Amino acid sequence: MNVDQSIFGYVRDYLNKPDKIKIEYYGSSFTEREFLSYALRVGGYLTEKGFAGKTVGIMLPNIPEAVFALYGASAAGCTVNLINPRFRTEALERILLSTETKILFVYDKIYPLHRKMLEKYGIEAVVCSPFYYRKGLKILYPFSLAACAGATRFSETLKSAECVPVKRKGEDAAVYIHSGGTTGTSKAVVISNRALNSLAESVVDSVHPGRMDIPENGGMLAILPVFHGFGLGICVHTVICHIRVVLMPLFRAKEAARLIKKYSVTHIAGVPQMYSKLTAERAFAGKGLKQIECVFCGGDKLAPQIKDRFDAILSEAGSKGEICEGYGLTETASVVTVNPRGATKEYSQGLPLCGNAVKITDGHGKTLPAGEIGNIELCAVSLMSGYLKDDEATAQAVYTDGEGKRWLRTGDLGYLDEEGYLYFKERVKRTVKIAAINIFPSDIEAVVNAMREVEECCAARATDAAGKPYVKLYVKRSPEAARASLESKIRAEIASKIVRYAVPREIVEVEELKHTPFGKVDYKFYEK
């Protein structure tokens, strides 16, 4: 398929069965014909209002309007600015101004919080409700004219005539995704049409070699948000070309189990915390899981015990599926490596997808041999164009080798085994050096999380009064574990399985650990 076109054009070229269902959302279904028409009508609205070719913001959870707006904006020749709905007004203001966003598709419940700021800069708002297309709840969730005064209802955009799709080049910017960057400061990552389209081709060719085993009536449970690289690149853009997208705006384990069964979900992509919660959910069991074929995990290290429990539940249900862990960054529009089905390796993030390459270096250009820990560098078909309006940061993160290939310095440490499987160890900046030895907090977490007395933990870098670094461990104890002996058990376990220098100086018990919006333990919070 031609990857050198807009993301709308790429998807449109794949859709050749007008009556086939493409999107499922709580009782509402949208066929290929309806999806394309709605997207083109949104594109028509943007064109009528003079926004064609401009930057369009989407600040929505996983609801149909987010998908229609994404591809509608692409059809109108726009670049889409994907924004987390949890951002506060100050952060949103900075993002909108730096990206020159002219119109914002926004969740109706949060619009009043940002209304004055949007009006100040003349940014038009289109309000969208997660209940509008949710059958049975639309009447119970009326549109508030007072709260959303000055904004346009999404339904109004669909009254426009379909636009004539704008032809765009592969190198043109498709989306801006906001990331901490490989250097740790917030940046807008520019992902081109070619990058997203190439990602979709690479994923399908790697997961379904020959494309012979793609289930005709398959469906992906889209748990990961569309404003996140993994959610956008995999759960929506790759999937919608081949199988159904089953949208879920907010993860709840019991509800996810219900949707998997109701919509015969065959593919799932998530983070470890989501799979851990699913395994603890009684509804996640039985023959309704038999159809699950592909399960992908990223965003954080996958503990073996989570994979074992999840895979066992699928096996008992008669499914041949298993969790396949992968690795990627926002700068690569999500996944770069993944474990092959039937050939997964514990603690590994798998092999490069088709067209990708991984190498480990010493940080000075020298490639290290298999088994040696060093800096992870990636050459990916989906590599970003760069950081928006930040050539210096782009030059620090991306370089071109002697063969003309572009490589990303990830800021991560890891190694490759003899078969080329990647093993991620730690973020470079999270590593703690004690007695000239590199201590990896994630190694400590893996050991402690494997203990039956512990539900979850976070190993954080701390500094004492003399400026010396040490490890401080935060632990959520299992209800049945005895508090008195737990600390000594943890220290002994770490000393025996890692090294004595990795034993935390402090161990703090907490009722709950703080998580990021994507379900990862927020280690940065505990390092402050």
Image: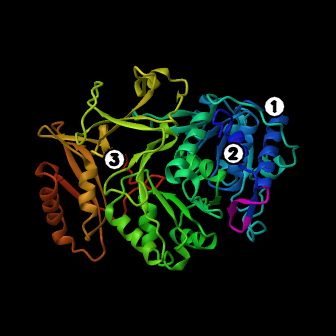
Q: In the image, 87: left or right of 186?
A: right
Q: Report the residue at 27% width, 26% height from top.
A: 366
Q: In the image, 442: left or right of 299?
A: left
In front: label 1 or label 2 = 2
Residue extent of the magenta highlight? 18-28
Mark 2 and mark 3: Cα distance apart in space: 31 Å
Mark 1 and mark 3: Cα distance apart in space: 49 Å
Secondary structure under the numbered disc 3 in the rendered image:
loop
Q: Quadrant of the N terminus?
A: top right
Please tell me whether residue 329 belongs to the stretch shown in magenta: no
Q: In which quarter of the image is the C terminus?
A: top left
- Choose the circle earlier in sequence order: 1 or 3: 1
Q: Mark 2 points at which residue?
A: 11
In front: label 1 or label 3 = 3
Q: Report the residue at 49% width, 44% height from top.
A: 334
Q: Name the residue under label 3.
A: 421
Quadrant housing residue 275: bottom left
Q: Name the residue under label 1.
A: 50
Q: How many marks on residues?
A: 3
- Residue 302 x/y as whole percent: 36, 57
What's the amino acid at mark 2?
Answer: Val
Please tell me whether residue 24 belongs to the stretch shown in magenta: yes
What's the amino acid at mark 1?
Answer: Gly
What's the amino acid at mark 3?
Answer: Tyr
